[in-house]
Each structure stands twice: as C-alpha cells, then as structure tokens.
Image (cartoon, grey):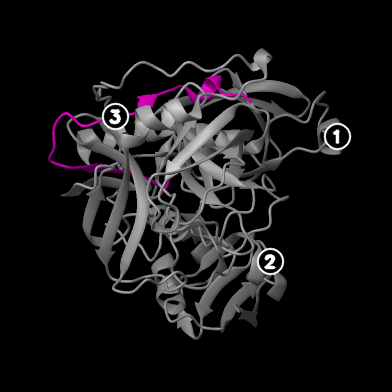
C-alpha cells in the first residue's frame, strides 16, 4: 500500500488546503505497493458520462444490532464477498527499492465490481507496469488490461476476460458514521485473502498531496499489499478502497485511509466511457479559519475556506474571488473546513459552473465560477505524490504563471505552495521560487523526479526569495 511520503505535489483540484492535516506526521514509509510500477496515467479530460455496472452480488449480510453489543458477522462477510477480492501482481521497471522483492515485481489488491471482469484498484498499484496479472481466490490467474488510471484520486480500473465472476456489493459512504465497524480484505505483504477489522475513526480527511479525496480514516490494520483492496461496512457493503497509511516504520500504526467508493465510482464511470478522468480547477490557495480570524471577519463560526491566494488567469480570478474572502458554500452546500472545498471542486468537471457563497467585508455575497481543468503540470505533480519515486523533499509546487515569470524576470521555476518534512527543516519557505536542483534548472515535476531517482542523500536547491537567490542544502536521509 501507499505509505504516505513527504509530498512533492500540486493539489490537482487547484485548491491547496493549508493546515488541514497539520496534526499528522508524514513519513516516507507508506502503504505503497511492493515495488509495484504501473501503467502510466492517461491525461485528464472532461467526461461526465455515467456508465452503469451490473452488480450481481448476493444480498447484504445482516449486521447485528449495535444495541445488542454483538460484533458484525465478519465471518459471513468474508465467506460471501471474499471470493470477489483479488490479488494484483505487476511487472515493469522497478521504481522503488524500499520493499524490493526482486525482478521489478509488485503486489497489491483489488476487487471485482461486475461479473464480466471489471476490477477496481489503486492507481499507484499499477503505475508504470508492463504487465498486470490478477489472481482470484480459487488461485486462477488472468492477464489484466488497465482501462485507465487517475493519479489525482489514486483510482485505477482493470478488466479481465472472464464471465460469471463473484462480485462485491457496493454501499453508500455518506451513511457511514464515526465508530461504525469495518472490515478490510487484501493481500498485505503478499498474504492473499487476509481480513482485518476495526472502526471508522474519522470522515472527510483531507491529506497533504491528496486534497481532492475526502478519505475515510479507520484503525483497521492495513499494510503494504493491501492497496486497492475493499473496505466493507458491517452490512458487507464496500464503502471504500484502502489506499494509504501514516507510519514511522512503513507498516501499520493505527492510521489507515480509504477512498470513498462514490468517489471511485465517479472516476470509474469516466474511465470506462473515455479511458480518462477529469477534474475541475478553481485556482485558489485556501486555509482553515481559526476562531480569532472568524471574529475579526465578523463571522459567528470559524466555518469555511479562507482564500489566501488567487492564481492569475484562473477560474477564481475570473469569478472575482480575492485573498481574504471566505468561501462558505458551494452550490448551496455549507463548507465546514477548507479541505471540503478541495474535494467538491476536484470532483467537478472542467467547464462546470459552481455557485460560491462568499463572506467578504462583514457580509455575504454570491459569485459564480466556471471551473478550469487540471493542467499537465497538475497531473505530473499529483502523480509524483502518489507513488514512491525516491527521497521526498516535502514540497507542494506549481509552475510560475507567465505573468509571474515576466514580473520576476525568470525564464522558469516553480513556486513553493506548501512545505513540510526535509525541505521545511532545511529552511525552505512558502512563496520561495525553486529555480534549480543540484545545479539543474527546474520548470517541471519530472525534472525533480529525475534527480530523486538516484536516491541522493542530500540535494542542493537554488531558490529565489524576495528578489535574492540562495542555495539551500536539504538532507534526505
């Protein structure tokens, strides 16, 4: 599985949430696949096509009444739906030596959602793979075709040529409550058909580098190899795809995160229809409100997303958003925290109009924005944050806009929009412009990735800060 690394990523929804997960300690030992390179993600485009998928799963497993104090029927859930959980093995160019098992092979999990061979898994499980093999619970194996992969949400869709396959039953994540029991099935460390149980610890978690997805947090034991496997509720319905953990060691430490199944299905529908997924972009940087800030703005509660920066030429700029505005509603739905804005915008389609409720100068106004689309730089940055590519800097970056390059007199460079981990300890600051890494000019995430592939113990960053250029050494060990 993906163990959450220090992220070098641009929030693809164009909404960078600051401070939404500040309580977490990021560490390069993620729930990542075991050396699992995968198929390159397709470009993101507008689609919005809904494709129904037949679900021939048996009826839901009845859950014991919470008032009775009894546990859900985990045995029945496993026996009924375990056969629909598959192992996913990939071969390709080896990208990550952290959990090497030789030969550039990787192991993950997945689950069958249609009897004719449609399978959901994580994008990072199949990233850069030359071949993908799916192994069923009866030990039969099938070559799999990757229909599409979306690094922004970390969802991939596979298809195998088979009929009358067992399938899972899909649930509604909106019905999930903190404290509800959950069951995870997957192949941790390659041990297939492994079941672990726990409870929902939190909902709507917005994680650094993955702000588009409102993750379900659980304490179900999830480890490398669980990536892409299903998370069941107590009724035996899949409510999420196990995707990430936070860890100091690379193994399970009580914090696991699942992609809500409704998010995954929206991406799946686009991929099945077009081979691609699309995500809207507003073009703002936002942060959570504090009680003192809310009071200073004349607000009764610290709810909403405080706009700290508006990208020139973006949908937000065209709509008239300004730094200091507080976005309180999107299409009439109230926002409690800034991360919720990232999720709503990121799961909307480019070109879609959204109504924004805004608090400005002690009064409420309404603006309308027509969303832009994720740029190639957004996709590359999101992809960089979703799979191990060497040591992590701990930077969220975006390319300089043409107006910014002209104003600063720079031919290229990338703006630091968020900093943590190694880069933060070395003194890199938000607003710095990264010009070069180890003497090589930087204008894209790919250039940074190429330097980090060699697993350097440290890098030298050339940054421009307030008109001055300085070199900053960053230890990566």
Give the mark nearer the N terminus: 2 vs 3: 3
Q: Residue 36: percent from the left, percent from the top?
A: 35, 62
Give the mark nearer the N terminus: 1 vs 2: 1
Q: Residue 57: percent from the left, percent from the top?
A: 30, 22
Mark 3 lies on a secondary structure that is loop
Q: Is residue 349 above or below residue 33?
A: above
Residue at position x 58%, y 29% in the image = 181
Separation of marks 1 and 2 at Cα, in angstroms: 26 Å
Mark 1 lies on a secondary structure that is helix
Q: Which residue is mark 2?
A: 429
Q: Which residue is mark 1?
A: 296
Please tell me which residue lies in front, 183 or 453.
183
Separation of marks 2 and 3 at Cα, in angstroms: 49 Å
Q: Which residue is mark 3?
A: 167
Please tell me which residue lies in front, 20 or 373.
20
Q: Residue 33 falls in which quadrant of the image?
A: bottom left
Residue at position x 43%, y 19% in the image = 61
**The C terminus appears in which quarter of the rendering?**
bottom right
Horizontally, residue 126 falls left or right of residue 100, namely left
Horizontally, residue 307 falls left or right of residue 95, namely right
Q: Is residue 473 above or below residue 413?
A: below
Residue at position x 51%, y 50% in the image = 244
Sort mark 2 into few (<14), some (14-19) or many (20+) by Cα contacts within 10 Å.
some
Mark 2 lies on a secondary structure that is loop
Q: Residue 458: percent from the left, percent from the top?
A: 58, 83
Separation of marks 3 and 1 at Cα, in angstroms: 53 Å
Q: Residue 380: percent from the left, percent from the top?
A: 39, 58
Give the mark nearer the N terminus: 3 vs 1: 3
Please tell me which residue lies in front, 108 or 382.
108
Please tell me which residue lies in front, 246 or 413.
246
Give, as a single range, the part of the protein colored magenta: 152-177
């Amino acid at each position: 599985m993906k163990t959450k690394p220090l992220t070098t990523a641009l929030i693809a929804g164009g909404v960078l949430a600051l401070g939404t997960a500040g309580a977490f300690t990021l560490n390069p030992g993620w729930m990542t696949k075991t050396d699992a390179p995968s198929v390159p993600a397709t470009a993101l485009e507008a689609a919005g096509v809904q494709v129904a998928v037949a679900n021939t799963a048996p009826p839901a497993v009845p859950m014991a009444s919470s008032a009775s104090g009894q546990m859900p029927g985990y045995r029945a859930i496993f026996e009924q739906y375990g056969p629909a959980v598959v192992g996913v093995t990939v071969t390709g160019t080896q990208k990550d030596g952290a959990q090497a098992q030789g030969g550039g092979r990787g192991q993950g999990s997945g689950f069958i959602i249609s009897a004719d061979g449609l399978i959901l898994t994580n994008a990072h499980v199949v990233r850069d793979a030359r071949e993908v093999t799916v192994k069923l619970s009866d030990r039969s194996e099938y070559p799999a075709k990757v229909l599409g992969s979306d690094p922004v949400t970390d969802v991939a869709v596979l298809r195998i040529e088979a009929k009358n396959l067992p399938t899972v039953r899909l649930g509604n994540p909106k019905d999930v409550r903190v404290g509800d029991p959950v069951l995870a099935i997957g192949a941790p460390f390659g041990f297939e058909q492994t079941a672990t149980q726990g409870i929902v610890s939190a909902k709507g978690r917005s994680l650094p580098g993955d702000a588009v997805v409102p993750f379900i947090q659980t304490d179900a034991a999830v480890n490398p190899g669980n990536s892409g496997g299903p998370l069941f509720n107590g009724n035996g319905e899949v409510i999420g795809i196990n995707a990430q953990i936070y860890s100091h060691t690379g193994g399970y430490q009580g914090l696991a995160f699942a992609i809500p199944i409704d998010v995954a299905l929206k991406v799946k529908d686009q991929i099945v229809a077009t081979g691609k997924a699309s995500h809207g972009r507003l073009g703002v940087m936002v942060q959570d409100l504090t009680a003192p800030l809310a009071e200073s703005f004349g607000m009764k509660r610290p709810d909403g997303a405080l706009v700290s920066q508006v990208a020139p030429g973006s949908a937000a700029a065209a709509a008239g958003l300004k730094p200091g505005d507080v976005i309180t509603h999107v299409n009439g739905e109230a926002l409690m925290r800034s991360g919720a804005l990232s999720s709503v915008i990121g799961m909307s389609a480019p070109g879609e109009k959204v109504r924004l409720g805004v608090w400005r100068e002690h009064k409420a106004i309404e603006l309308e924005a027509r969303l832009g689309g994720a740029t190639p730089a957004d996709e590359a940055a999101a992809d960089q944050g979703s799979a191990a590519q060497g040591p992590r800097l701990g930077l969220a970056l975006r390319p300089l806009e043409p107006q910014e390059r002209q104003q600063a007199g720079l031919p290229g460079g990338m703006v630091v929009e968020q900093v943590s981990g190694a880069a933060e300890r070395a003194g890199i600051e938000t607003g710095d412009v990264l010009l070069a890494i180890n003497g090589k000019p930087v204008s894209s995430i790919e250039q940074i990735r190429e330097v980090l592939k060699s697993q350097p113990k440290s890098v030298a960053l050339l940054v421009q800060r307030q008109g001055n250029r300085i070199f900053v050494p960053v230890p990566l060990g």
